[in-house]
Image (cartoon, coloured by chain):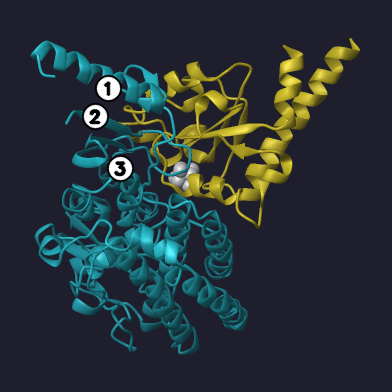
Amino acid sequence: MGRTIVPIGPYHPLQEEPEFFKLTVEGETVVQIEVQVGYNHRGIEKLSEMKTFDQSTFAVERICGICSTSHPFAYTQAVEDIFPVEVPMRAKFIRVIIAETERIHSHLLWLGLAGHFLGYNTVFMWAWKLREEILDVMEILSGNRNNYAMFKPGGIRRDIKPEDIPGVLKKIDSIIPTLEMLKKAVMDDPVLHARTKNIGILKKEDAINFCAVGPTARASGVKRDVRKDSPYAAYDQFPWEMITCEAGDVFDKLVVRVLETFESIKMVKYCLNKLPDGPIDLNFKDIPPGEGIGHIEAPRGECFHYVRSDGTNRPARHKVRAPTFMNLPTYKATIIGQTISDATIILAGIDPCYCCTERMGVLDTKGNRIYSGADLLLLSQQKTENIRKQMGVK
Amino acid sequence: MSVRVQALLKSPWIFHLSTGSCNNCDIEILDCLTPRFDVERFGMLLAGSIRHADVLVVTGSASRKCIPRMKQIYEQMPKPCFVVAIGECALSRGMFIQSYNCPLPIDKIIPVDVYIPGCPPKPEAIIAGIMKLVKKTEEGLKNKQAV
Ligand code: SF4
């Protein structure tokens, strides 16, 4: 059967970063996938070396807008690891509150987008409406809807006022019934079952071999969560459960994320109720030479930072490894052999920092002209035709 | 020309172009579409293709790989059109001004009509910015007719 190349991206109408996928299809079935990245490269590691330790926190916050807690969290832990210091307990609790609130907003965001990709715009609107409440909570706690600027090496930048706490708890409680309803609507819907069950299965061995992290790995039955494996901040101070599923298909990834949202709500409520007193910052000034690592569980998986200090006030080297970097290659295992109509949701299934659909202007591989999706399909079919003629194959 | 501009203002369709942003600006644009802000009440809609769009919304600090694509996309847009730059990155590159991969601010690459500052700007600010663009252009058209 003839092969056709379907390009996806790099620009698409919905959101997020430009990325380019080249799917090779035989009839309806995807036989090969190629990913091109780099449209978003801004040289943050290098920039971070030009900034002081304190300023770098803001630089890493702007790596990804959805994970604007995860990166500073990992970075501050890496800096604190250079000359092991113990952060005050109150700061640890507030860090957990911010990180878990972010997880709720990130998972809701993904749920909405997944619904949108499946043609369920109602889910999209509901999930994003709920997400607004969480952003309000963020605004009360940190002063910002996104890019919270709460972290600094040695503690946090802004305390939570005791008078804010009852309001926040009430807001969080108010979203639980809607979230329950959304959970039922999503998990019991026969159409959603048909679209996501047994689609894009990532087997347990594959998840281990590809070093998948986060919900992508947990949906395949790999018990891997930095918060449990090497507890940091206050995650060892209270009980919570790691959510895992067995099948590894898109539905399980969805279930893991929805259930994790409830876990996170529990954690935030616990931390807000049991917030210890004390200082929030160590206020250290000098950072001695040395190197440190910090890793945390971001909404999408393990986020890893490495910082080397040479005794000056700037990092000598800063290295970042984001979770999508590990999850991206699992496409090789999940998408091959699936139909092209399922490709979108499988690509979205790992919750990459981008999501793609096929209904927009497309670039050809030489990168010098843009066609519409239909034009390009026609062109590539013609090309196959020409090649066939040249080779004398019928 | 003015008839076309007038028609465009009734229901400006938006195409969103991210040129190396951190997602926050993009998410805030999407947020404008969701129930709380609901820009559709102003007739604004996200267009699926640049060829259907009236307003190009640009975010991000124009990385080297994006610049040629950005120019192409601007060329393909049906004219007359408006360009709105959203976020500190798109305005002046913000903290990425020293980056080796962001050589030019966006308004040196394509003409920009409206700047909406913020990192990221709130959805209210985005809606206000675009409404200001619509109002200003309407006023301009009226003055022109009066002359
Ligand atoms: S202006 Fe700020 S929020 Fe917007 S893309 Fe740039 S860094 Fe991100």
The amino acid pointed to by label 2 is: Thr
Towards the viewer: A53 or B123: B123
Q: Is residue A1 above or below residue A95?
A: above
Q: Residues within 10 Å of mark 2 (few under 14, many from 20)?
A: many
Return the disc, 2 or 1, that comes first in the chain's sequence: 2
Q: Is residue A98 visible?
A: yes
Q: Residues within 10 Å of mark 1 (few under 14, many from 20)?
A: some
Same subunit: marks 2 and 3: yes
Q: Is residue A150 visible?
A: no
Distance (Cα) linking label 1 and label 3? 16 Å
From the image, which quarter does the C terminus of chain A lie in? top left
Q: Which mark is residue A381?
A: 1
Q: Is residue B69 above or below residue A348?
A: above
Chain identity for the colour cyan used in the image: A
In this image, A327 relative to A57: left or right? left
Q: Which mark is residue A340?
A: 3
Instruction: Determine the chain carrying the residue at label 3.
Output: A
Residue marked by disc 2 = A4
SS at circle 3: helix
Q: Position of residue A276 (x, y in %)?
A: 43, 88
SS at circle 2: strand
The amino acid pointed to by label 3 is: Ile
- Contact check, label 2 and label 3, Cβ < 8 Å: no
The amino acid pointed to by label 1 is: Gln
- Contact check, label 1 and label 3, Cβ < 8 Å: no
Picture quadrant where residue A220 is located: bottom left
Distance (Cα) linking label 2 and label 1? 6 Å
Same subunit: marks 2 and 1: yes
- Contact check, label 2 and label 1, Cβ < 8 Å: yes
Colour seen for chain B: yellow
Identify which residue is drawn at 54% across, 54% down: A121
Towards the viewer: A80 or B31: B31
